Image (cartoon, helix red, strand yellow):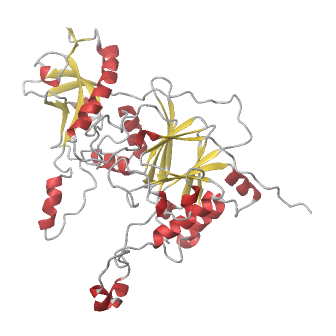
Amino acid sequence: MTSEHPPFERQQTVYKTDPQFQLDSHSYQTQYVDIYFLRLAVLKKIVESHGRERWDGVEVNGETVGRVERVLDVRQGEVCWVVGTVYMDMKLKPNVLEDIAKDHFISAPPPRQKYRDPENDKIMIEDESGRLELIGDKIREEDLVTGCVIAVMGTETANGEFKVIDVLLPELPAQIERAVPESLSQTKKYIALISGLSVTGNVHESVETHLLVEYLLGEVGSSADQSKSASISRLIIAGNSLSEPQTQAADEAAASSSTSRAKSKKYGYDSTSYNAKPTTVLDTLLTDLCTSIGVTLMPGESDPANASLPQQKMHPTMFPTAKYYTGSTFIPSTNPHACEIDGVRFLGTSGQTIDDIFNYVDGNDRLEMMEKTLRWRLVAPTAPDTLWCYPFQDGDQFVIDACPHVYFVGNQPEFGTRLIRGNEGQIVRLVTVPKFSETGELVLVDLETLECEVINFKTKSSIPSS
């Protein structure tokens, strides 16, 4: 007796992790200023080459534009161009001294959505020689952030400010050629992107989460749904898989009474301050998935990993069952994460990088912010100014050396996608991945066309009434 539907086979792909964001050591013994020197040393050569192509021999008001080696070599009245690192002097930007002072506040000040204050903010350019303030409409239009390296052309005013006429960025790096078939194949291969699962560990975990797992395993839906599920070769979880840490209920803590408080706690953990249920539930979900599909797990802001970027992979021993799939279908990874899947290069973060840039700029277009990071060639330009990171010694690991084909950012307010092009023919698919716990959305990326598709698991019972 034959089955009504033939069994579907999971599409297989070749997956290679890029170790760019893996750290050999975790040391805070060096100064953070080294990051800016290392970053400038790499990107200065690139921006200088763009500057020579654009400005060599150019005349402005009858005066030939000259090249200035250092910021402090700029002379008043001379039209010139110089390369340096941007520093945004913003009064509303967080300050570590203010954070310490919060301990003395009666009530903490409300968090700011934006650091911008156009009337008082100053844009500076600096190098090892010094710092120079930039003015003019042209520089204000760029929506820059602290840490990006640029070239500016203009002239110094009588007030010692540099009036900017033109701006150049490093632009997109070289991109490996992707094999594009002449005609589309009938067999699709998808990479699934998801973020913000926010597993709580409750007995009644969200229905959407269970539907997601069953869909990826091909256990629900029609024959067409199961066929598409089988076309998904890998799931990338872009951070915040666990909910924000919460203590056990206050009544449970009270029930422990003075007797338990008097106990000498030598081993184990205090259950009133730690809840292992979310990790246990996530381990179960990962184990179910790894029996059928490859899973890459990136840490996020709410996950049990180091807070400083690049966040290192969550240790497999945290997942006592899923760890047995490590190296095969279970790949704990870093944040940011870079990999190559069937010749398609992916680069992504769990969202902290773009969330921080959002505070610097006026607009709300997060895809444009993502594009800016690629054109700056920096996956985390605001680190270490307003984003925690390690003080690198040998090189800035946030510099983007190879242009990705797919660039994704997790834990964003909503799904969005855009195709951008570089000056040398680079084509990049930008994807903002929303929080699954809020939207119930899973993003599929076609490895052949780089087109995106969204599958929504939100149930009617979970949609708030208007």
Residue drawn where x is 69% and y is 47% of the image: 11
Could you tell whether 204 is left or right of 256 in the image? right
In the depicted view, which residue is nearer to us: 12 or 350? 12
Q: Nearest the camera: 336 or 269?
A: 269
Q: How many marks?
A: 0
Q: Where is residue 327 in the image (x, y as percent from the top left)?
A: 56, 50
| Residue at (20, 50) in percent of width and height | 93
Please tell me which residue is depicted at 53% across the width and 72% down the height of the picture: 205
Residue 178 visible somewhere in the drawing = yes
View extreme (right): residue: 1
Q: Position of residue 188 (x, y in %)?
A: 69, 43
**Image quadrant where residue 210 sits:** bottom right
- Compared with 128, 359 (above or below) is below
Q: Which residue lies furthest to the front in this view?
A: 266
Q: In which quarter of the image is residue 13?
A: top right
Question: Which corner quadrant holds the N terminus?
Answer: bottom right
Q: In this view, does 208 lie to the left or right of 169?
A: right
Query: To which quarter of the image does residue 167 belong?
Result: top left
Give the side of residue 73 with respect to residue 315, left or right: left
- Asked if residue 168 shows in the view, the reply is no
Q: Is residue 64 above or below residue 206?
A: above
Given residues 255 and 405, the one toward you in this image is 255
Residue 117 percent across, percent down from the top left: 20, 47
| In the displayed structure image, the side of residue 379 where residue 451 appears, left or right | right
